[in-house]
């Protein structure tokens, strides 16, 4: 531990610029990779059974649902409202799913084959959209309540995360301080044992 601490100290002392540039490059690559993965909805496909979507996904759905209700209240047709509401979404999966559903709803009922394409949309939202029946506008009150439910879900997740942040930071600080103390203390104990033994 002491040797590793001395190497880190030497690196910080003589190569601070390179260390800083390396840390910034790693941070930029990690941010890019995370945006790429979440933007394409890969985490939802891979870990959806564990996470039920990230908080950013749920926030996007809440905003989309609220916009959809506002546009339907403005007397737009369902396909037009779906297209306009999805245009403001930053989540590619949600945008593509809403566009597919809008295209399906634009066709006459005689051309509908099977159930509507709802992959990429939460089941509760698709149920609220389909609640009015075929060729009917969804109930905007129900959509607003659903958007409020999604917003409360995100707030609960944030409250839980904020509650965990403090203890996790204390543990991380304790581990760093413990590592430094042991790295300084172990050589002294070895030296004293070598002199007395």
Image (tube, rainbow, N blue to C red):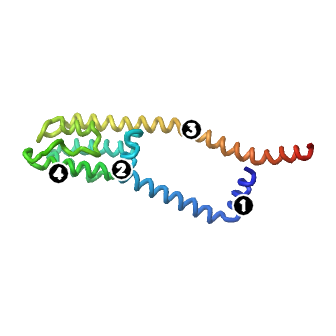
Marked residue nearer the N-terminal end (2 or 3): 2
Up/down of 17 relative to 50, above or below: below
Q: Please state if 103 lies on the left or on the right of 63 as rendered.
A: left
Q: CA distance from mark 2 to mark 3?
A: 30 Å
**Residue situated in front as seen by the camera: 156 or 195:** 195
Marked residue nearer the N-terminal end (4 or 1): 1
Q: Confirm or deny contact between disc 1 and disc 2 (CB under 8 A).
A: no
Q: Please state if 157 lies on the left or on the right of 96 as rendered.
A: right
Q: Which residue is mark 4?
A: 103
**Residue situated in front as seen by the camera: 142 or 57:** 57
On the image, which quarter does residue 150 sit in? top left
Q: Which residue is mark 2?
A: 41
Q: CA distance from mark 4 to mark 3?
A: 47 Å
Q: CA distance from mark 4 to mark 1?
A: 62 Å
Q: Position of residue 117 (x, y in %)?
A: 21, 45
Marked residue nearer the N-terminal end (4 or 2): 2
On the image, which quarter does residue 9 sit in? bottom right
Q: CA distance from mark 1 to mark 2?
A: 42 Å
Residue plotted at (49% across, 59% down): 29
Up/down of 25 relative to 172, above or below: below
Q: Which residue is mark 1?
A: 10
Marked residue nearer the N-terminal end (3 or 1): 1
Q: Nearer the viewer, mark 3 or mark 1?
A: 1
Residue plotted at (68% across, 60% down): 12
Element type where label 4 sits in the image: helix
């Amino acid at each position: 531990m002491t040797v590793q601490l001395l190497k880190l100290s030497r690196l910080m002392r003589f190569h601070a610029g390179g260390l800083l540039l390396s840390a910034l490059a790693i941070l930029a690559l990690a941010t890019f990779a995370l945006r790429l993965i979440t933007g394409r909805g890969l985490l939802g496909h891979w870990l959806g059974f564990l996470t039920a979507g990230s908080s950013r996904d749920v926030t996007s759905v809440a905003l989309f649902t609220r916009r959809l209700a506002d546009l339907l209240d403005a007397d737009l047709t369902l396909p037009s409202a779906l297209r306009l509401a999805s245009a403001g979404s930053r989540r590619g999966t949600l945008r593509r799913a809403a566009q597919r559903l809008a295209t399906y709803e634009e066709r006459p009922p005689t051309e509908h084959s099977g159930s509507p394409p709802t992959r990429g949309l939460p089941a509760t939202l698709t149920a609220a959209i389909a609640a009015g029946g075929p060729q009917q506008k969804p109930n905007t009150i129900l959509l607003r309540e659903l958007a409020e439910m999604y917003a409360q879900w995100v707030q609960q997740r944030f409250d839980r995360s904020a509650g965990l942040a403090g203890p996790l930071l204390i543990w991380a600080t304790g581990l760093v301080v413990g590592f430094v103390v042991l790295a300084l203390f172990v050589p002294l104990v070895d030296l004293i044992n070598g002199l007395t033994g």
